[in-house]
Image: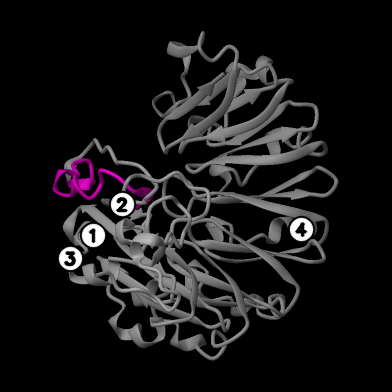
Amino acid sequence: MEAVDDDGCAPSQLDDDNDGVMNDADDCPLTPTGEVVDADGCHGGSVVTWGDSYSGGNSSSESSNLSSGVIQIYSANYAFAALKSDGSVVTWGNVWQGGNSSSVSSNLSSGVTQIFSTNYAFAALKSDGSVVTWGGSGGDSSSVSSNLSSGVTHIYSNPNVFAALKGDGSVVTWGSSSSGGDSSSVSSDLSFGVTQIFSNSNAFAALKSDGSVVTWGLSYHGGDSSSVSSDLSSGVTGIFSTSYAFAALKSDGSVVTWGHTDNGGDSSSVSSDLSSGVTDIFSTNGLYPRSGAFAALKSDGSVVTWGHADYGGDSSSVSSDLSSGVIDIFSTRNGAFAALKSDGSVVTWGSSSDGGDSSSVSSVLSSGVTHIFSTGSAFAALKSDGSVVTWGSSSDGGDSSSVSTDLSYGVTQIFSTNDAFAAIIG
C-alpha cells in the first residue's frame, strides 16, 4: 500500500511540477513549468564531445550520465561540467583541473543552479545558497567553507581565484592568494554593501552600493588603487578591465584608471578627454602580457583611446574618423578595435595582424554594417543585406573566401570561438 499525504493522495496520483509525469516516476521533480520532458520527467538533451581527450574531448566515461537531461555545459581550460535538469552535475576532462568531482559527488547530486569556473577549477552554486568547489587553483575552498554554506547569490572569478558575493553584500574569496584569493587586507570594506565584482588576470575590484570601489590582488595589476582612492570613493557606476588594469566610469561621465601603466592603467595623456561625457568603455587584452588598451565612447559619438599603442591604445591614424558618429565599439582579444558608425561604416585600428587593418575590405565596410563579431584576431561584419565581411588573421577567421558564396546573403546570426566563426543562414 502506498503512503499518502495529509490529503490522502499517493505519489502515483500527484504531479507537483505539472509536467505530466507523476511524482513516483519523476526523476526531476522541479522541472520549470512549460518545459518538454522525457519519460523520467526531465528536460534537456544529450552531449556529444570531440577534440583533445585530455581536455574534455572524450566523455565516454560519463556517457550514460550525459545521454539525457543536460541543460547547460560549463568549461574550464581543460575540463567540462554539465548541469542537468535534476540539479546534478557531471564532469569530465583533466582530472586535476576540474574533470574529476568524485570528492564532492554527494554534494553535486542535486540542487545545483549554476556553475562558475577559473582556468582550472569549478564552483557550483546551489539553490540553498551554498557553494561546492573542486579542481585545481580555486578548487579548494576549505579555508572559507563556513562562509560558503549559505547566502551566496553569485560567484565571480579570474584565472586562479573565486570571489563569492553574498546576499548581505559581503564577499568571500579563495584561490591563489597573490591573485586575489586573499582579501584580508580589505576584509572590513568587503563585509557589507558590495553589489558587483569585476576582475582582470590577477586582481579584483568590487563596486559598492554607495558608488565606491574596493580593490585587492596583485598590486601593480590593479589590486592597489591607493593612488586614485579619492576618485573611487563615490560616483562609480561601472568598471572595465584589460589583463592588468582597470577603468572606472563615473556618473558624471569621467573615467578613473589604475593598474599596469602599459596596459591602460595610465590615462594621463588623455585625461582632459576623459573628464566628462564618456558613456561606455571597451578593451583589448593584447596577444602578449601587458599589451592591452582601452577605448572610451563619448556621448558626442567620439572615441578616446589609451594603453599599449600597438594594440589599440593609439588611434591617431584614424582620429578624424573617430571624432563623431560612432555608436558602438568591438574588439578582438589580441589587440584591435572596430568602431561602428551611425552611417553603417566601420573604422578599425590597433594591431594590423589582429584585425586593426581593414584596408583590403574598406570598400564593403563603407556602409550597411549592422553588427560586428570577433575572434581572438579577426572580425566579421554582418550587413543589412545579410552578407558578411571578414578581415584580420586568416587562420582565426579573417579569410572567409572558401565560403564567400554562402556568406553573400541570408546570414542572420554569427557566433565565434577564439579562432573561428559560425554563421546561421536563413
Q: Which residues are magenta?
A: 54-76
The amino acid type of the residue labelled 4 equals Leu
Residue at 34% x, 60% y: name it: 12
x and y percentages locating residue 293 in the rendered image: 58, 50
Badge 2: how crowded within 10 Å, few (<14), some, or many (20+)? some
- For label 4, the residue is 274
- Res. 378 in view: no
Badge 3 or badge 2: first in the primary sequence = 2
Task: Specify the label residue 97 is tagged with.
Answer: 1
User: Is the image coloured rainbow, by chain, by secondary structure, or in one colour?
Assistant: one colour
As drawn, which residue projects farthest toward the bottom? 188
Vertical arrangement, residue 329 with respect to residue 139, above or below: above
- For label 2, the residue is 77
Distance from disc 3 to disc 1, alpha carbons, whole Å, reads 13 Å
Which callout, 4 or 1, points to the residue nearer the camera? 1
Badge 4 or badge 3: first in the primary sequence = 3
x and y percentages locating residue 18 in the rendered image: 48, 55
The amino acid type of the residue labelled 2 equals Asn
Badge 4 or badge 2: first in the primary sequence = 2
Badge 4 or badge 1: first in the primary sequence = 1
- Res. 401 in view: yes
- In what element is the residue under mark 3? helix
Distance from disc 4 to disc 1, alpha carbons, whole Å, reads 42 Å
Q: Are marks 2 and 1 in contact (CB under 8 Å)?
A: yes
